[in-house]
Amino acid sequence: MFSSGRSYPGRRYLAIWLPHWPADRWRRARRRAGIAPPAEALVLIASGQGGVRLTAVDVAAAALGLVPGMTLADARALEPGLVVVDADPAADQAGLAELADWCGRYAPWTATDGEDGIRLDITGVAHLFGGEAALLADLARRLTAAGIAARTAVADTPGAAWAVARFGAGSSVAAGGTAAALASLPLGALRLPPETVQALSRVGLRAVGELAALP
């Protein structure tokens, strides 16, 4: 496993965030089976506290303002024509592992990262693709062609790449530029417990740079 934040001289890490992975995986499975996926907005659901709730949404559903955690009743009130599918976490994780293996075309070491991410050690291999920017462009093109929404980032540490992919613009952070790249990001980018983020926010600390400036 990667260290979450330690920097090793010369090492470079790539993080891939898949914000709509369960929905993208479901559509991809349908296409592989020769079944055209529906064009309408798609949500995945599971029974939970307070009734049936959304566990994931696709790009179209997100654009309508639907988010995981919302009740299905509220979602249908906003968009009656939703396509609703039962969540399948086991299939999602198996598909993510398969995608991580596929990413071996870009690096000798890949791994899944939680339920919606993949991480790669691309140290010493980016030049084979024409540089980091070209590698990211090729990866983005292939994922888009496969119907997978993704945001990527490269940085000196796995933690920094994870943070920039999810909370930043998604880009290649220059070697040695980790602190500057993280400074404006919210404290959630540090993977702190939510209660810690809330406590720090109450005392006026909301960005990584504000926390880093303290003694």
Image (cartoon, grey):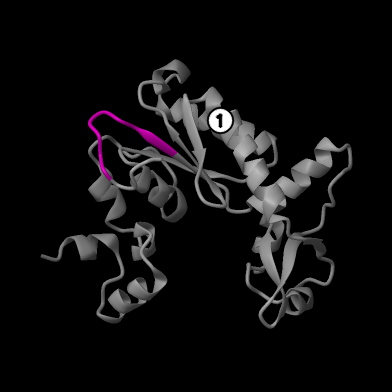
Q: Few, some or many C-alpha atoms within 10 Å of disc 1 (few <14, some 14-19, many ≥20)? A: some
Q: What type is the residue that disc 1 sits on?
A: Cys
**Picture coordinates of residue 38 (x, y %)?**
85, 52
Q: In terms of image quadrants, where is residue 195?
A: bottom left
Please name the residue shown 69% across and 83% down the image. Answer: 50
- Quick check: 70 above or below 93? below
Q: Position of residue 127 (x, y in %)?
A: 40, 18
Q: Residue at x 52, y 51 (%)?
A: 114
Q: Identify the element where label 1 is drawn.
A: helix
Q: Which residues are magenta?
A: 6-14
Determine if the magenta segment contains residue 147: no
Q: Which residue occupies 84% across, 67% down? A: 81
The residue labelled by disc 1 is 103
- Where does the image place residue 80, in percent across and percent down from the top left? 83, 72
In the displayed structure image, the side of residue 125 where residue 27 appears, left or right: right
Would you say 101 lies left or right of 179 here? right
Along the line of sight, which residue is nearer the eye, 141 or 24?
Answer: 24
Query: With respect to residue 102, does 84 lie above or below?
Result: below
Report the quarter where the N terminus lies: top left
Q: Does residue 85 sit above or below 165 in this rendering?
A: below
Q: Is residue 179 left or right of residue 145?
A: left
What residue sits 33% from the left and 43% below the top? 3
Residue at far top of view: 128
